[in-house]
Image (spheres, helix red, strand yellow):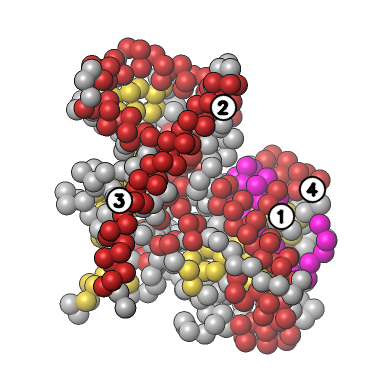
């Protein structure tokens, strides 16, 4: 993934997720669909996914008990929605928060493109590497972030297996292929868009 | 796995990272207990005694070795914690313990005479006299050399201390201070890697995004860096802080960068170095799998007289690498 700016006014990398996020923001009638995203349906789906992960990775959540009531604001930079995560405490859960809503207080904020956040959740990428390249922005309680990161990294979470196991294999294969195709196409577009700037730099440099 | 003259010693902060290291081709994996007895005492990291026993069993089933780092210095009146760690390591079936403190070396030798002793880099032993003394007195069989020696110095020292084996760092965090003696973290936070097992404890670190998009990093009450959004970052340690002095802003001690000694593998094999160490018990299993795999291929190629260049730019602090003191351009 190319480096991404932390400034929320700067765009995240071009990806299918970003396109989906932009579509949800601007295209009628998608903004109307965006509202239920933060509504009861999305809240129920988020909580179901969280509960399922909690059941399947009990040992990890036991490790996270030391967090107590501490919460995290998880901010996929390419989507018009954020999530409030409370991994432990009296009322653990995951709640979506629509763009423009008042943000609840959180011990720490993690901001990155959705694909980077999912890769981190599944331990497919190293958190420090994402941080070094500024693809991951962290603010707030670093101790809480490290507890969360280290527990999750060792969990062996695999979202496809853990959450989508009941979907037909053919649907998953098609979805993966479609995402890969669109992502490849967008990378090509991004490279083409950068080409004039790269040529200009090449002319200036000896 | 065929025996190589250069053993690949790899980090694991979690059981999952240990499995990743073994799968990627580590000859030995080093771990620590989840307390102040090791120099990577970070929140949520490391092994309980039960997890360590299971880790030793899995490592041995795969035909590899498990080393346990107990490489901090016991705090006055609290040595029972460190003694218990040595006992737990012996009970877990560790192939070696990595120690720095003289008293702990004496305890391990007296209490567990068959336990193999490695000297941690935290002991900062860099002369033949010091290493020979530790070998003769405590039976130390391997010494991890400080990261401030040139390749020529490593070669001379390895020859001078034989049959004591030498182990050197090949990749990862680049600590430029005399390890085991650095007090920078302690100066600002009250905690140091030497006695608390943690440099720049997470509880003292704060990152804040400023209105213009810049990010400010603070350690305790000290602002240690402020950088523009998108510029590469390093660990929030004082030695990698950027400060303003005499109207110039810059890195006073060290730029954020990672050690990468891959280019020196043929020289290190020729020098008779016995083991190559990858730093990074605080890193995730993706880092462990990637770096260990790349170095496994690089070592095997070097042993066969060939050469491969590990592709590890994405794993490096600040996105940059240095050969450190090995090539003598840096001291």
- Which residue sits at x=31%, y=38%? A77
Q: Is residue A30 magenta?
A: no
Residue at mark 4 to residue at mark 1: CA–CA distance: 10 Å
Q: Nearer the viewer, residue B292 or A15?
A: A15
Which circle's residue, 4 or 1, is located before the other in the chain? 1
- Give the magenta-colored segment's residue range: B1-22
Q: Are marks 1 and 3 on the same chain?
A: no
The residue carrying mark 3 is A193
CB atoms of marks 3 and 4 within 8 Å:
no
The residue carrying mark 2 is A173
Label 4: how many Cα within 10 Å (few below 14, some 14–19, many 20+):
some
Q: Position of residue B7 (x, y in %)?
A: 73, 65
Q: Secondary structure at mark 4?
A: loop
Q: Is residue A63 above or below residue B293?
A: above
- Which residue sits at x=76%, y=55%? B65
Q: Is residue A48 above or below residue B41?
A: above
Q: Position of residue A74 (x, y in %)?
A: 35, 34
């Amino acid at each position: 993934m190319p480096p991404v700016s932390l400034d929320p006014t700067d765009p995240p990398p071009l990806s299918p997720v970003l396109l989906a996020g932009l579509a949800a923001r601007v295209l009628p009638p998608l903004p109307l669909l965006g509202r239920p995203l933060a509504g009861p349906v999305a809240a129920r789906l988020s909580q179901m996914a969280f509960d399922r992960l909690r059941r399947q990775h009990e040992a990890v959540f036991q490790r996270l008990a030391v967090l107590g009531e501490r919460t995290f604001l998880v901010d996929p930079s390419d989507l018009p929605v954020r999530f409030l995560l409370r991994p432990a405490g009296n009322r653990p859960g995951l709640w979506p928060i629509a763009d423009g809503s008042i943000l609840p207080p959180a011990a720490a904020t993690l901001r990155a493109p959705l694909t980077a956040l999912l890769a981190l959740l599944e331990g497919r990428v190293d958190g420090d590497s994402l941080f070094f390249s500024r693809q991951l922005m962290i603010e707030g309680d670093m101790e809480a972030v490290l507890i969360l990161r280290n527990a999750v990294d060792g969990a062996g979470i695999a979202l496809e297996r853990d959450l989508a196991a009941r979907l037909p294999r053919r649907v998953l294969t098609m979805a993966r292929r479609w995402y890969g195709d669109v992502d490849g196409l967008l990378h090509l577009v991004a490279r083409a868009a950068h080409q004039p700037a790269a040529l200009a730099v090449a002319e200036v440099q000896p | 796995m065929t025996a190589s003259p250069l053993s690949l010693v790899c980090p694991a902060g979690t059981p999952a990272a240990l499995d990743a290291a073994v799968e990627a081709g580590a000859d030995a994996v080093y771990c620590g207990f989840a307390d102040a007895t090791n120099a990577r005492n970070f929140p949520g990291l490391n092994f309980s005694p039960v997890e360590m026993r299971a880790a030793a069993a899995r490592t041995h089933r795969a035909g590899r070795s498990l080393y346990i780092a107990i490489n901090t210095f016991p705090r006055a009146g609290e040595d029972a914690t460190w003694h218990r760690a040595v006992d737990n390591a012996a009970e877990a079936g560790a192939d070696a313990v990595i120690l720095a403190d003289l008293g702990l070396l004496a305890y391990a030798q007296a209490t567990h005479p068959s336990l193999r002793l490695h000297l941690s880099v935290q002991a900062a032993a860099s002369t033949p006299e010091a290493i020979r003394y530790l070998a003769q007195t405590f039976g130390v069989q391997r010494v991890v050399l400080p990261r401030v020696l040139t390749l020529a110095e490593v070669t001379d020292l390895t020859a001078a201390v034989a049959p004591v084996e030498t182990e050197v760092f090949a990749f990862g965090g680049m600590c430029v201070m005399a390890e085991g003696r650095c007090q920078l973290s302690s100066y600002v936070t009250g905690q140091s890697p030497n006695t608390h097992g943690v440099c720049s404890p997470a509880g003292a670190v704060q990152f804040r995004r400023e209105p213009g998009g810049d990010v400010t990093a603070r350690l305790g009450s000290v602002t240690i860096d402020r950088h523009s959004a998108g510029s590469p970052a390093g660990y929030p340690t004082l030695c990698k802080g950027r400060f303003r002095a005499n109207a110039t802003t810059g890195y006073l001690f060290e730029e954020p960068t990672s050690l990468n000694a891959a280019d020196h593998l043929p020289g290190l094999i020729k020098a008779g170095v016995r083991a190559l160490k990858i730093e990074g018990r605080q890193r995730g299993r993706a880092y462990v799998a990637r770096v260990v795999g790349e170095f496994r291929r690089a070592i095997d190629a070097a042993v066969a007289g060939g050469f491969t260049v590990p592709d590890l730019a994405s794993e490096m602090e600040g996105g940059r690498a240095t050969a450190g003191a090995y090539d003598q351009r840096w001291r």
